[in-house]
């Protein structure tokens, strides 16, 4: 099962609160992971479910917001946590309770696909993960595309 979401505005996926902020791309990734899990493993073992995210833009929307706020002289501290590239995988892990390995690979997902597959295979061989999902995020001139797919694990 593969889930693909496209959007010119990833902020449409955001569910930020006054005390919790994550980059809009992380929220879009969460939506794709949630849908994929519902289709392939509605009740995954959280300790052995792994997530790898590849991205071309990382947390660029939040970094741009921080730059604007800095020019105005006031930056909201929650933005810094939301700008960390690790939030792209971390938000899904936090919200879905996943405690297996996770990794964010920065760069063109086409070039990082072999690395992601090697990590998935290694995690499985070592018994660290039974289910591994890879999320590819690409920013194009048309907007953002997020694709989540199982690369290893249970049926």
Image (spheres, rainbow, N blue to C red):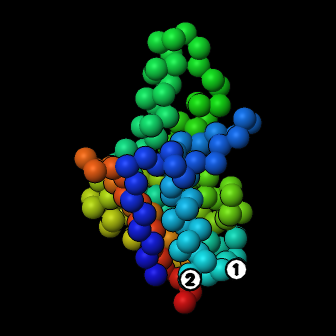
| Residue 96 numbered mark, or none | none
In the image, residue 135 lies at what x, y percent?
A: 45, 63
Q: Which residue is labeled 2 in the image?
A: 40
The percent coordinates of residue 148 (x first, y second) are 45, 68
Seen in the picture, residue 143 relative to 150 is either above or below; the reply is above
Element assignment for label 2:
helix
* Residue ID at (51%, 58%): 29
Residue closest to the far right? 19
Q: Vertical placement of 67 versus 27: above or below?
A: above
Camera sees residue 6: yes
Q: Nearer the viewer, residue 67 or 48?
A: 67
State the residue in front, 136 or 50.
136
Q: Secondary structure at mark 1?
A: loop
Residue drawn at x 43%, y 76% as measured from the top left: 2
Q: Which mark is residue 43?
A: 1
**How far is disc 2 from disc 1 in space, using C-alphas?**
9 Å
């Amino acid at each position: 099962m593969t889930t693909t979401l496209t959007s010119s505005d990833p902020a449409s996926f955001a569910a930020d609160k006054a005390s919790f902020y994550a980059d809009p791309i992380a929220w879009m990734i969460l939506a794709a992971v949630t849908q994929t899990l519902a289709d392939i493993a509605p009740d995954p073992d959280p300790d052995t479910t792994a997530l790898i995210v590849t991205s071309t833009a990382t947390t660029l929307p939040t970094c741009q917001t921080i730059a604007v706020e800095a020019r105005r002289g006031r930056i909201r501290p929650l933005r810094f946590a939301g700008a960390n590239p690790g939030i792209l995988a971390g938000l899904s892990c936090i919200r879905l309770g996943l405690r297996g390995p996770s990794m964010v690979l920065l760069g063109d997902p086409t070039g990082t696909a072999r690395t992601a597959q090697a990590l998935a295979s290694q995690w499985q061989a070592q018994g660290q993960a039974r289910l591994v999902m890879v999320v590819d995020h690409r920013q194009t001139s048309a907007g953002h595309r997020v694709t989540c797919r199982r690369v290893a694990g249970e049926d």
